[in-house]
Amino acid sequence: MAAVGASAARAALWAVVLVNVVVVEILFVAGGAGKNDVLTVGKFLGVHAALLMMVQLLLVARVPWLDRRLGMDRLTAWHRWVGFSLLWAVVLHATVVVLGYATLDGAPVLRTFFALAGVVASLLGMAAAAVVVTVAVLSTRWARRRLSYETWHALHTLLYLALALALAHQFLETTTFTANAWAAAYWWGLWILTVGAFVGGRFVLPLWRNAYHRFRVSAVVPESDTVVSVHVTGRHLDRLPARAGQFFIWRFPGHNRWWQANPFSLSAAPDGRSLRLTAKAAGTTSAGLRAMPVGTRVFAEGPYGAFTALQRTRDAALLVAGGVGVTPIRALLEEAAGDVVVLYRVQTEADAVLLAELRDLAAGRGAQLHLLTGRTSEGARPFDPANLARLVPDLTGRDVFVCGPPAMTAAVLRSLRALRVPARQVHAERFSLA
Ligand SMILES: Cc1cc2nc3c(=O)[nH]c(=O)nc-3n(C[C@H](O)[C@H](O)[C@H](O)COP(=O)(O)OP(=O)(O)OC[C@H]3O[C@@H](n4cnc5c(N)ncnc54)[C@H](O)[C@@H]3O)c2cc1C
């Protein structure tokens, strides 16, 4: 079952990391000390910074097996935290190495720094460190709030440069892994596997899938003044391993710049013939989708995400949607087996997009559907623990899938904790990737 799948995937991922950390410690000890104690510490930090860089790559490689079980949101959240550890490892490595050489030569720190900058291998390392520090600063919440997603993402890709510089730095330096041929083969093999997973998941697989499926817009259907559904067809869609609840990262090259890519969930379970996304106007891309001509070429990366029935641990389920968060919930309802309750939170019934479809699906499956209208500012709090328990008395025996605005999702998750619904039964899609 899926929660088992999720914990097995988490255990497998961290076991791989741990085993490699242990191997690296053994090789580090076998490789011998540095020219003095400070340089030994510097070398230790450098090796671990490189390992963290590999973990970083693996977390965002979009390896399908991991993504389906752990979800891109969780993997990117880990990537964010490992990223800050990488920053400290890189800064400490650079500082300690300069201090180590200053001690060795009995020279002032600044003069040692400039002397090292004159050596190609060290200069490459310094440049890689400078890029890592810059990107880390731009990834703080303060900076993220001030940058558009596209600008931040473009700056984040500078890390590819840091990676190339760091690899060249390692290649030219005399390190733990140059002392012995086995150690060198292991280390570079590890790098080849990690970079291979990243290139495969981020470039080869999406390019191959798009060449194979040739996605195109087949219909554009307004759902309301601000929400539109886009139907997409292609070749051999029955071979696309997409599930209800997952999302794709979409590019519409005729409508947008090629570097603009937006995640949208499938708003209908994939049927092997077409895909559907439903987008609320948030900015230029989503607002402009309704003007897109039929036949427009689409580039879709995915399917991604773990918000699927693969996570089910119980026979009964509660699906909670808020606003446009109804999209994956609508798809999940289509596929849902067993006893299902759906709660759909909107301000007014007129705001409830896809409501007719939800009603038909609920009726066809014998599921209960509750439309919860009202404004929170005027006192409507359907997700307070007491209200939630009244709406769904057997809550603790259900898997709960939640997708809605951040404040609503947080309120539902708080109430589920208060009502002691086991964490393994709770699944949330946040419409944000860390
Ligand atoms: C996993 C996931 C599933 C989603 N599913 C749906 C859905 O089914 N229906 C729906 O209406 N919305 C969905 N969203 C939200 C949707 O992606 C954004 O509203 C959309 O990208 C806005 O783009 P824009 O160019 O119209 O607006 P912009 O003005 O460019 O962006 C508006 C907001 O969206 C964020 N955003 C823009 N591009 C991206 C990106 N590539 N990745 C992450 N955030 C981005 C920006 O940071 C900003 O906060 C989903 C988001 C995620 C992460």
Image: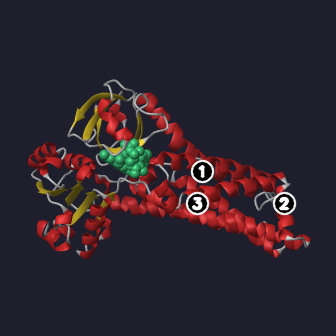
Seen in the picture, residue 121 relative to 256 is either above or below; the reply is below
Earlier sequence position, callout 2 versus callout 3: 2
Left or right relative to 92: residue 397: left
Residue 27 seen anywhere in this rendered image of the structure: no
Q: Which mark is residue 114?
A: 2
In 3D space, how far apart are the residues under numbered discs 2 and 1 (Cα atoms)? Answer: 33 Å
Give the quadrant of residue 289: top left
Seen in the picture, residue 273 relative to 165 is either above or below; the reply is above
In 3D space, how far apart are the residues under numbered discs 3 and 1 (Cα atoms)? Answer: 25 Å
Left or right relative to 116: residue 259: left
In 3D space, how far apart are the residues under numbered discs 2 and 3 (Cα atoms)? Answer: 24 Å
**Where residue 190 sits: x, y (%)?**
64, 53
Residue placed most toward the observer, 149 or 296: 149
Q: Which residue is mark 1?
A: 194
Please identify the quadrant where the C terminus is shown: bottom left
Earlier sequence position, callout 2 versus callout 1: 2
Q: Give, as a three-letter code, the residue at label 2.
A: Phe
Q: Which residue is mark 3?
A: 137
